[in-house]
Image: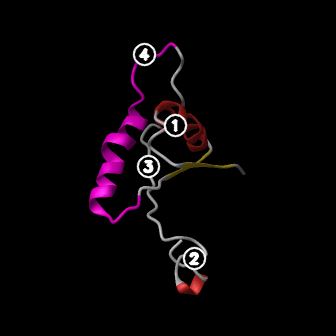
């Protein structure tokens, strides 16, 4: 991304901050909740209440966010707009 957003990459991509999150329990964090589960979605809450505010405070951000996921992360990406649609402006699922 650094190369593509520089003059050497002909500025093909806008400059961006990429955040990757490691999961101790991928199944717990990335699978959607069952309809009968009344507990809150801890991972989406973590993004909205902790991670995004931290990044906005620490780095010069713009008000446009994209959530991208692959495999179980792609499933999480597809479910996030239903739980907290205000968190991201765009969503990308990587399918291989």
Mark with earlier residue (1, 4): 4
Percent coordinates x, y for residue 44 in the rendering: 42, 37
Q: Residues within 10 Å of mark 3 (few under 14, many from 20)?
A: few
Asked which quadrant contains residue 4, the reply is bottom right
Identify residue for label 4: 38
The residue at 36%/39% (across/down) is: 46
Q: Are marks 1 and 4 in contact (CB under 8 Å)?
A: no
Identify residue for label 1: 80
Q: Nearer the viewer, residue 62 or 16?
A: 62
* Highlighted magenta segment, given as a residue range: 36-62
Q: Residues within 10 Å of mark 4 (few under 14, many from 20)?
A: few
The residue at 39%/43% (across/down) is: 47
- Asked if residue 53 lies in the magenta stretch, the reply is yes
Instruction: Indicate the secondary structure of the residue bearing disc 4.
Output: loop
Percent coordinates x, y for residue 72 in the rendering: 58, 40
Q: Are marks 3 and 1 in contact (CB under 8 Å)?
A: no
Query: Most prominent secondary structure in the magenta stretch?
Result: helix
Mark with earlier residue (2, 1): 2
Instruction: Indicate the secondary structure of the residue bearing disc 3.
Output: loop
Instruction: Indicate the secondary structure of the residue bearing disc 1.
Output: helix
Could you tell me how far apart the alpha carbons at marks 3 and 1 are, in whole angstroms? 17 Å
Percent coordinates x, y for residue 29 in the rendering: 46, 35
Could you tell me how far apart the alpha carbons at marks 2 and 1 are, in whole angstroms? 28 Å
Identify residue for label 2: 4
Could you tell me how far apart the alpha carbons at marks 3 and 4 are, in whole angstroms? 25 Å
């Amino acid at each position: 991304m650094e190369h593509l957003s520089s003059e050497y990459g002909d500025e093909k991509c806008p400059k961006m901050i990429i955040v990757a999150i490691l999961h101790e329990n991928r199944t717990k964090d990335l699978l959607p909740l069952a309809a009968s589960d009344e507990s809150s979605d801890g991972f989406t809450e973590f993004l909205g209440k902790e991670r995004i505010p931290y990044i906005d405070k620490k780095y010069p951000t713009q008000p446009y966010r994209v959530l991208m996921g692959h495999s179980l992360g792609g499933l999480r990406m597809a479910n996030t707009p239903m739980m907290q649609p205000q968190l991201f402006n765009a969503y990308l699922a990587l399918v291989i």
